[in-house]
Amino acid sequence: MKSRHKKRPDKVNVITLGCSKNLVDSENIITQLQANEYEVTHEAENDDANIIIVNTCGFIDLAKQESIDTILQYAQYKSEGQIDKLYVTGCLSQRYMDELQMEIPEVDAWFGTLELPGLLARLDADYKHELIGERLITTPPHYAYLKISEGCNRTCAFCAIPLMRGKHVSRTLESLIQEATSLAKRGVKELMLIAQELTYYGLDIYKKRALPELLEALSAVDGIEWIRLHYAYPTRFPTEVLDAMARLPKVCNYLDIPLQHASDNVLKAMRRQTTQEEQRQLIELAREKVPGIAIRTTMLVGFPGETEEDFEELCRFVEDMQFERLGVFQYSHEENTLAYEMPDDVPPEVKADRANRLMEIQQEISFAKNKAKIGQRLKTLFDRKEGQYFIGRTEADSPEVDNEVLLPAEGNYVRIGDFAEVLITDVSEYDLFAALPEG
């Protein structure tokens, strides 16, 4: 008996650029298109797709350039007749749509960050409301990102996110539990909660910060074993989140809390609404309430007016606080941000030098912290096999940005997507080498 449904002759390839929040958006695009009988791939190389959707990033100069280069690459393919249609969505499209339409006429249509129904309509596809909370994932099947809100109400001087993503809008607790339950039934064991500003969750719809309640509810979902928190703002941080982390075993003792700087002069110019002393107190409180917590932070160097003295103060702060994980960005002068009115007066070579110097400090910190783990037994979630190793992560590590556990494949066996206890036998600055304990 033949199926009543027939795949459309068109094939779509979705290209994702930028952060994990963009990845979730792409996964929702794929889910909706497949429900409309499209054959869809994600970032397929040498693919025979005749329709390309590029989901762009517009956060900083490097990300914008990567997005533009990718669009131009597919515009060339269209000019050569290799593809039929080219659509662009995401942050860059939201922010620079008018200019880009003029510069790259090969693109058939441009869409903003919240225009999924319009993109689908252009493809003669219906937006299926019943799929809200249901999505296919492009990550390994044992972990997934869960976007709990969209947009941001903060007014950081350097940040263009509110221009591209709008004001903060929380998803309902019910919709998040529905999605988490669906993901768990499909084998997801780790949820990474993401948002532009995690701690604002619930203020708009529940008139209170409801992240602790969300963590309680997600912890009750069968099958979910790790819940990880990304992108929490430090100013007026709700310490109830730390209490929930300490109380709920499924919530990883891990917090991604971008601090951006430590000099009070720079923090004020950035409009971060906090001071170095308040940041110190928050980190100390987190470590007091959640012993063993792994804190990931991000620092921004080269902000307008940042002096060598400001930078040295930042270096001392990083040395004092001994963060478990740290990333560094170089300031990017973004149009229509508050900082754009300031002179971009730190030369590019100085920005690069400061970023390198700060990462050298963190490299030493990371190596020392890793050495202290030799001889410890750590619960590890294994993500993949690569070369001669099974590659996994501990509770202190998020995919792609943090340390990895390397277990030799020779003489050992673990299942990808499963947890295993390993013995740490050796380390490098950013890797832990392991063996399966005997007995």
Image (spheres, rainbow, N blue to C red):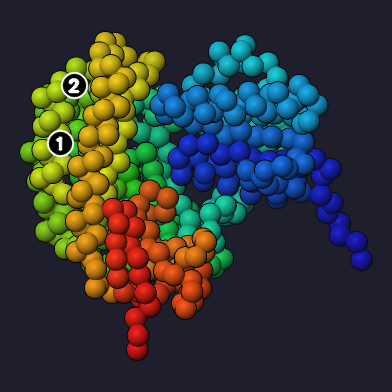
Residue furthest right in the image? 1
Q: Residue furthest bottom?
A: 439
Where is residue 428 drawn, in percent x and y?
Answer: 30, 57
Could you say which is closer to the camera, residue 251 or residue 364?
A: 364
Q: Quadrant of residue 259?
A: top left
Q: Decide if residue 200 is in sight here.
A: no
Q: Nearer the viewer, mark 2 or mark 1?
A: 1
Query: Distance between the Cα atoms at labels 2 and 1?
Result: 13 Å
Three-letter amino acid code at the position of disc 1: Cys
Q: Residue at x 37, y 63 (%)?
A: 405
Relative to 66, 231 lies left or right? left
- On the image, the x and y values in percent for residue 404 come to 37, 58
Q: Which residue is mark 1?
A: 315
Residue under label 2, please give it: 306
Query: Label 2 is placed on what type of residue?
Result: Glu
Along the polypeptide, which appears first: circle 2 or circle 1?
Answer: 2
Q: Do we see residue 151 in this rendering?
A: yes
At numbered mark 2, what does the secondary structure look like: helix, strand or loop?
loop
Question: Of 434 and 200, which appears nearest the observer?
Answer: 434
Q: Is residue 77 above or below residue 279?
A: above
Q: Residues within 10 Å of mark 2 (few under 14, many from 20)?
A: some
Disc 1 crowd rating (10 Å Cα; few below 14, some 14-19, many 20+) is: many
**Left or right of 66: which side holds 354?**
left
Would you place residue 128 above or below residue 309 in this image? below
**Where does the image place residue 82, in percent across and percent down from the top left?**
78, 31
